[in-house]
Image (spheres, rainbow, N blue to C red):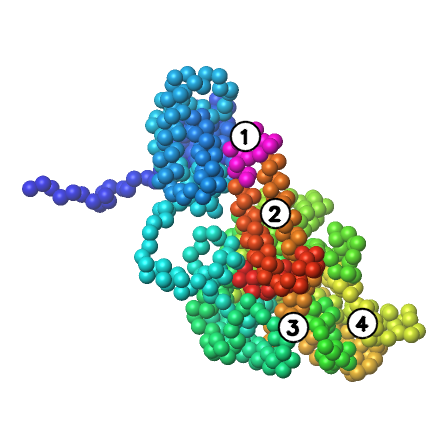
Amino acid sequence: MMPPKRSAAFPGHEPKCKRKMLTIKEKVELLDMLQERRSYAAVGRHYGINESTVRSIKKEEKNIRSTATVTFNKMAKRVITHRNKLIVKMESVLALWIHDCREENISLDTNTIRTKAKQLYDCMAENMENGGDDKAGPSTSTGSPTKAGKFAASKGWFHKFQKRYGLQSVFLHGKAASGINESTVRDIKTEEENIQSTATVTFNEITKRVITPHTKSIVNMESALALWIDDCCKKNISLDTNTIRTKAMQLYDCMAENMEDQEEDDDEDDEAGTSTLTGSPTESGKFAASKGWFHTFQKHYGLKSVGLYGEAASADKAAAEDYVNNTFKEILKEGGYRPEQVFNMHETGLFWKRMPSRTFLMKEEATAPGFKAQKDRATLIMCGNAAGFMIKPGLIYKAKNPRALKNKNKNVLPVHWMHHPKACITKILMRDWFHQCFIPEVKVYLAEKGIDFNVLLLMDNAGGHAVDITHDGVQVEFLPPSTASLIQPMDQGIIRAFKALYTRNSLQSLVEAMDMDEDFSLKESWHDYTIASCLKNIQKAITEMKTETLNACWEKLWPEVVHDYKGFSPDEIHHSAVDNAVRLAKILGGEGFSDMTAEDVNDLLDMHSLPLMDEDLEEEEQQRDEEEEVVGLTLERLATLQEKAQELQQLAEDWDTNTARSLQFRNSIDSCMSVYKTMLTQAKKQRQQLPYVHNLHEASVMSMPLAEVLGRDYKDLK
């Protein structure tokens, strides 16, 4: 009998050491040590590798140093090798062939392209061996066919070729279409209406799913629900799946009831319009907010990465204690950070034109028709360090150029100005604030202090926070989930103190206006309070924040750096500002002002942290719709975009002598423009369906906003 095979690991034998692979940066440092005439053995001992490995790295010195000059990743471990000149030429010709097949609508699959690549390579290799390329100019790609070996057109090569020539979104992969059963044809015919509708709005020519039309109530409800979720996220209100589904049913019932009332009025007046969103609430049956609907809604609004689902999380005290006592201390020790170098950022909502609810200003506005100014929101991004310094705040508003800031230079405002239709933070705006506000402000601050630019930025894991922001000299760390309310410095009363100061400053501006004008009217003065006035009071409130107050809010996370803040704690600043606000209100006088109490002001501050009510969501959605009717992508603008894109492609083709590069550019433009091409095609179809009498007003139709031509269903499907 043969002895049994022994296992890979058995008593008395140590497992093999894991192969050590140096990064490009380490290899360059190793080569520098060899240039200093240190022996191969000494360098090998220094890096814990064999002498033979050191000699192999030395042989590849040219390629390694070349890679080091172009790599974007200091931790990269692979060396860039020069490609075969023949393969480079073959790929260029292959790209032209693929482009020609696309123009003639010839179906291609992966195997067809790989076979064609091998044919082209063999043909070119034969010509080169026969001396056909003797006059070819110099090339950075070296090597001959015989030296490089047989070209196999592997799957790995194909994916790299696909990436190099920008063909990711082009239908080239998988099997070419084949025949289908007759029953399948009949099923497709049954779904003709939905398929035709999907084809007019889809952004992906090879999509396989059919869009089923929503009722108008569901579309409006989902849009309002997304606003509500976003508002809860910004206010750190925990949500779970059941809570969101329950809220969806409440919003649907509310909107369906309002729509039914509106339809009854329209029937009486015989003025009911048509809509591409079919079905009424009663026709579609009761909306159940099922799990299937929820997952579709989650995917539609990009909420995969938002921590809203599962059991609603409460503050995790154990995780907070572990982070403070262990993780945070290790980060500080490894980075060698000083209090001036450690920052925390947090965003907060601000109803910038709101007074306590008992005042006559708020009561009169509540009964007036139209959008309520007291519900106009902005989002503030506040950031300060452990030494008590706060940088210029970021502000996100719904309008890019509000009337009050017309012709104003946004770069000299007391805030870093950003805009978003919902006035909420997104990952794009987060990156903008990080690179355009945080980095420049902190660099200037540390330079004035004579401190190195070595910074630690702490933030919570809210949905709008980008996780991929990087910059040399900056380490970004996210606090553990459900710990922000316990240890995040900006959550320890500093934001509430700021809002109390802002409220006091708003009342102070009204008192100053009253002192200067004998014919003062509180109602008119408050009407004239604009977003420009808001920015002045924000700047004043930030300036009034004492260094000791900002330093005190780090007591729970980093108590060792907190100094004596007696008289300057966030709570003391908050109470002082509230008392002054009450005093100023009594000077103004009037219902709700003369008898204002500290409780009224605190209720106002609490409103900033409460989630929006159903009627608020509906009004905000209506206001957004009205704004979209005024601005947007008109037919004329879409046509201009298409024309300019074609001009760019033609210029690249005429001017660039490198045909492969110009083809890659053309493919990239086509891929980017596919969305606008689809929108333009659908808009033209809708215009052709207009009654003949509308042709008399073609010019006015061309200037109509796209929301009017296509209807809101297109935007929601998008």
Disc 4: which residue: 526
First in residue order: circle 1 vs circle 3: 3
Number of the front mark, 4 or 3: 3
Asked whether the viewer can see residue 118, the reply is: yes
Left or right, residue 437 beside residue 519:
left
Number of the front mark, 3 or 2: 2
Give the Cα distance between marks 1 and 2: 24 Å
Q: Nearer the viewer, residue 268 or 475?
A: 268
Disc 3: which residue: 619
Give the Cα distance between marks 3 and 2: 35 Å
Instruction: Tell me the crowding category of disc 2: few under 14, some 14 to 19, or many 20 or more residues within 10 angstroms, Cα based.
Output: some
Is 123 covered by the magenta stretch?
Answer: no
Q: Are marks 1 and 4 in contact (CB under 8 Å)?
A: no
Disc 2: which residue: 642
Left or right, residue 694 beside residue 81:
right
Give the Cα distance between marks 4 and 3: 22 Å
Give the Cα distance between marks 1 and 4: 63 Å
Q: Residue at x 45, y 55 (%)?
A: 207
Region rendered in magenta: 653-666
Task: Name the element at disc 2.
Answer: helix
Residue 576 picture location, percent across and down: 75, 72
Give the Cα distance between marks 1 and 3: 55 Å
Q: Are marks 4 and 3 in contact (CB under 8 Å)?
A: no
The quarter of the rendered structure image containing the C terminus is bottom right
Number of the front mark, 4 or 2: 2
Disc 1: which residue: 658
